[in-house]
Amino acid sequence: MEKSSTYNYNVEPFTEDICGNLAWGNLGNLILRCASLHAGEHGFGYPQMIKLHHAWVLSRLVIEMESLPKTGEDFGIETWVDRLYRQFTDRHFSITRPDGTPYGHATSIWALIDTETRQPADLEQLPNGGFANVLIPERPSPITPMGRIRMKNAELVLTHKAAYSDLDINGHVNSIRYIELLLDYFSAELLREHPVHRIEMAYCLESYCGDTLEVYHDIDSKNANRHLFEIKCGEKVIVKGSVQL
Amino acid sequence: MEKSSTYNYNVEPFTEDICGNLAWGNLGNLILRCASLHAGEHGFGYPQMIKLHHAWVLSRLVIEMESLPKTGEDFGIETWVDRLYRQFTDRHFSITRPDGTPYGHATSIWALIDTETRQPADLEQLPNGGFANVLIPERPSPITPMGRIRMKNAELVLTHKAAYSDLDINGHVNSIRYIELLLDYFSAELLREHPVHRIEMAYCLESYCGDTLEVYHDIDSKNANRHLFEIKCGEKVIVKGSVQL
């Protein structure tokens, strides 16, 4: 079995943003789907792990796109894992045209949590020899890892009460919904003229139906195109992230 | 060419609701995609019509499901058109298991609008003889059409500022986002115990990025399981709908 897998998609109608590009939210969801499908093919998917009382938890997600596929265009998402370290594993993605050239890339960090004790599992003790035979150590992340989110003048810009349609199968607010909440800070006109280039997300805590999520915003003091965000529920930080135009 | 088309899908990870069923929002989007793909195959899709300065506008959408496909399950969406009348056309859908038995059905009403004059087009004057050779008059809607939405004691239950991630390629709030707003009235616990059976939507006016959408709720005086909704922007009614548990 190949160590990396490529999943092929097409930008179908009603999956685009206002510019006719695949919407970032839909791209983010496809990236998570490919992670899950690839893990499943190798015996470590959600259904397999939940039987062992474990669940994958997304800790970091960075997506960087030079451009996005448009309505009707075919694209592929290749995913692979390059390393394990302590309780974490790094999974990378390339989003490619049919000729193999990249639209962009993504990188993510995951932990495997014991659903009873909430403790992270030892990733070298997985069934069937674990990840050892899947790793591609010679293919590290194609993009730089997440930078620091240092907010100096955080301003509350949006409040959202987490509701039914935000939830995924775990009953938590879906990881990608947080990306959409950050994008909702921007006007449609601004994003039409200044497309999003890179999104960084650090997932700190889960939030639940009924939680009041407050989105705080600042500009990176070293890069005026890098918008910094924190999503809080009361005093708890749920997500930190950035959107670079 | 067959007059009806069936599109095959699988409930991939991260497309489910809290119960592991295909989420209603994702089902709704797939239904619209299939409408668009089928229209495209017959020469009347979005890209073909926009060249002729026309665009399809969804007027009504009713979805009724006995149950929903679950994580990993395959399902098909068959769609066909049974009639034209005045400026409208009726398009129907069956959501089926691989053995052909239905999970449920949907029905929709569409108008074709001249994008310059905003007037509805004569559907019998479409290029290539129009819809005439696509109609299946002997296959009317498999479900009852939309009932009345008569609200007596409308109560404001939710306010949402339309934002970037709500928009589709036309720059309007996406039709399915309104369904999600109605579902967001309910708690996750309630929908876990009382699954949604039927959703009815009447699309009256478009809304745009920055609009403040107010969701009003009432209970059908003749059916305590039928929740009635109106989404307004100021005094304008954007959507009327119902959710039956």
Image (cartoon, coloured by chain):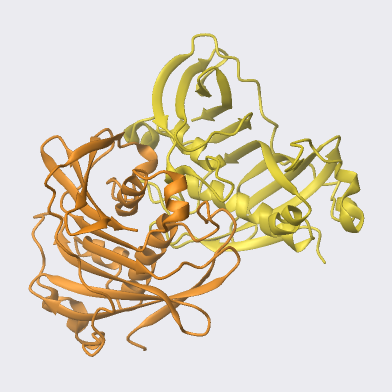
Chain colours: A orange, B yellow
Determine which quarter of the picture holds residue A186. Answer: top left
Residue at figure coordinates x 49%, y 16% from the top left: B218
Percent of width and height locating residue A185: 34, 43
Q: Residue furthest top?
A: B152
Is residue A84 found left or right of B140 in the rendered image? left
Residue placed at 79% from the left, 53% from the top? Answer: B52
Q: Nearer the viewer, residue A161 or A222?
A: A222
Image location of residue A77, percent across then percent down? 42, 74
Q: Position of residue A52 (x, y in %)?
A: 20, 65
Towards the viewer: A240 or A136: A240
Residue B110 visible (yes or no): yes
Q: From what the image shows, is residue A112 above or below residue B106? A: below
Q: Against B69, is B193 above or below?
A: above
**Quarter holding the N terminus of chain B?**
bottom right
User: How many numbered marks have been drawn onto this rendered protein structure?
Assistant: 0
Q: Is residue A210 above or below residue A39?
A: above
User: Residue B230 vs residue A234: left or right?
Assistant: right
Does residue B86 appear to the left or right of B196 in the view shown?
right
Instruction: Look at 51% across and 60% down and name the residue there.
Output: A21
Along the viewing direction, whichever of A228 and A230 lies nearer the viewer = A228
Please state the horizontal and vertical placement of residue A207, each as a whole percent of the image: 22, 43
Between residue A49 and residue A36, name the one nearer to us.
Answer: A36
Is residue B70 something that shows in the picture?
no
